[in-house]
Amino acid sequence: MMKESIWIATAFVLVIPLLFVMRSTKWSVKGKHVFITGGSQGLGLALAELVVSKGADVTICSRSQAKLESAVEEIKKFAESGQKVAYVAADVSTFEGARKALELASGQDQGKVARVPDVVFCCAGASKPGYFLEQDESHFTEGIKTIYMTALSTAHAATQLFVANKKWDGKLVLTGSTLSFVGIVGYAQYAPMKWAIRGLAETLRSEFLLYKGLSVHAYFPGTILSPGFIEEEKTKPKVTQSIEDGEKGGQMPMQCAKKLLKGVENDVFLITSDFDTELLRVATSAGGACPGNNFVVDRIKSIIALIGVTFWRIFTADASIRKFAKQSPDQVPGLQ
Ligand SMILES: NC(=O)C1=CN([C@@H]2O[C@H](COP(=O)(O)OP(=O)(O)OC[C@H]3O[C@@H](n4cnc5c(N)ncnc54)[C@H](OP(=O)(O)O)[C@@H]3O)[C@@H](O)[C@H]2O)C=CC1
Ligand SMILES: CCCCCCCCCCCCCCCC(=O)[C@@H](N)CO
């Protein structure tokens, strides 16, 4: 008996430092080539600045050349001499656009590749909130294009590039939202697309097991105080705002970028940056169908979620929507 406990104690003493050593050899972005869609503003721009400050080369991508040029100047302030900061102007909502963007970023010329990105972050996206009845087909097709197709096309082109170049340590990072786990009034054009991105991440995680170390991550931010957020506020119904306002005001793009990068460094599959989204993540995924973060902690959180999220839905979200309809029927399309 005594002997056994000595063995167990010795095993612990050996295993615990080993775990620390394993943690300290985690993946680092230093020296990597990082490609970021939506890199001209908001989350994508902050992420570009962050990875460059940590010693990476970066290529940002978005549609507007003027915005890209000024973003490159901003990012260069974080670079040391010898680091590369480049941009590619492209619309990544089509397969053709995303393929060309990644080819240009890789410096491909006459079949020769200069440098394939090591990490591809898909941050492009935008929402146009509004009442379902006040939106028409164009809002929904725009949503499919800007939110889902930008992610799908970039994911497809990146996977092709990684596999064709045998870049088995390649990383693909998709961006969802808190609204990848829950749908609320005003987001019919957006939330389903962000759910689809979560579905894509889960599917690709499974399929990437075929390809050695190739990995996929997905990030689910809450409100980001970005230029995109200022834009969406213009059409956001008051009832939607009132539910969101309960969510403590949002985070700065750099705060989000830091939490996102930390998640990638720690090989977290579904990355969150606030506790509410974390509860929604465990409520939706702690069943085991996709990898969690920590088996025990996730299950403790899911007990909190079971109570917290249900209460939030009944007494905060649903209650404030019903109250709004009663108090301001003139603002609800089709009522009065
Ligand atoms: N802001 C928020 O509250 C939240 C945002 N998110 C998500 O996080 C991500 C970043 O958000 P945020 O920082 O607000 O973004 P912004 O709206 O501020 O910026 C979006 C970026 O995407 C680019 N972009 C849009 N469409 C395309 C396209 N078709 N091809 C290439 N680039 C494109 C834009 O440039 P250009 O227009 O020049 O092409 C811009 O650089 C998005 O996916 C968003 O849905 C998730 C949760 C909350
Ligand atoms: C105790 C547990 C409580 C659970 C609370 C859940 C709260 C959800 C409220 C909705 C927040 C929406 C943030 C993302 C918004 C977004 O993606 C858009 N701004 C698009 O840009």
Image: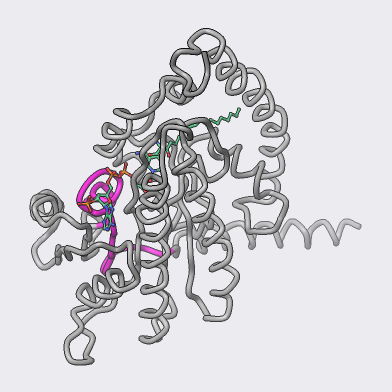
Q: Residue sitting at 8 percent across and 52 percent down?
A: 66
Colouring rule applied to residues: one colour
Across and down, in percent, residue 271 comes to 49, 50
Q: Is residue 317 above or below residue 173?
A: above
Across and down, in percent, residue 115 comes to 24, 79
Side (left or right) of 315 relative to 195: right
Across and down, in percent, residue 215 comes to 48, 69
Q: Residue sitting at 64 percent across and 18 percent down?
A: 315
Which residue is outermost to the bottom? 111
Q: Residue sitting at 37 percent across and 41 percent down?
A: 127
Q: Is residue 167 above or below residue 323?
A: below
Q: Which residues are magenta?
A: 27-51
Side (left or right) of 237 relative to 188: left
Q: Residue sitting at 70 percent across and 46 percent down?
A: 296
Which residue is outermost to the top? 327
Camera-nearest residue between 61 and 143: 143
Side (left or right) of 7 relative to 101: right
Camera-nearest residue between 226 and 17: 226
Side (left or right) of 209 relative to 53: right
Across and down, in percent, residue 93 comes to 33, 62
> Which quadrant is home to the N terminus?
bottom right
| Residue 160 sits inside the magenta stretch | no
| Residue 32 sits inside the magenta stretch | yes
